[in-house]
Amino acid sequence: MALTEEQKELKKELAGYKRKVVELAGEIHDIVEDTIWTDYARLMTLSQDVQNAMKVVEDFKAEHTFLQ
């Protein structure tokens, strides 16, 4: 089944939300790999940011069930 233009736009929007989660996770990874001794204090904030960003993804997917 082909996606409508609106569905394609929503899919792109979801991809942007997912990219944000991956970027945040990448920051955590970089700290753990490279700068844990100096930047460990940022981990708590970044962890919360990941949780918030994942909630946006999950809520968006729940609202647009065809994206599952």
Image (spheres, rainbow, N blue to C red):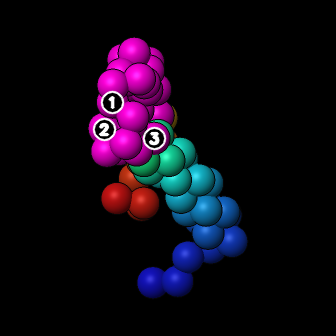
Name the kind of residue labelled 2 in the image.
Val
Query: Which mark, by number, is residue 36?
Result: 1
Residue 25, image quadrant: top left
Q: Which residue is mark 2?
A: 32
Question: Which circle, 3 or 2, is nearer the viewer?
Answer: 2
Find residue 26 and report its horizontal and vertical position in percent.
Answer: 42, 47
- Seen in the image, is 56 located left or right of residue 41? right
C-alpha gap between disc 2 and disc 1: 5 Å
SS assignment for the magenta stretch, majority = helix
Residue 30: within the magenta?
yes
Q: Which residues are magenta?
A: 27-53
Label 1 is placed on what type of residue?
Ile
Q: Which residue is mark 3?
A: 27
Q: CA distance from mark 3 to mark 1?
A: 11 Å
**Residue 57 horizontal/vertical position (percent):** 44, 42
Q: Which mark sits nearer the N-terminus, 3 or 1? A: 3
Q: Does 42 sit left or right of 16 as displayed? A: left
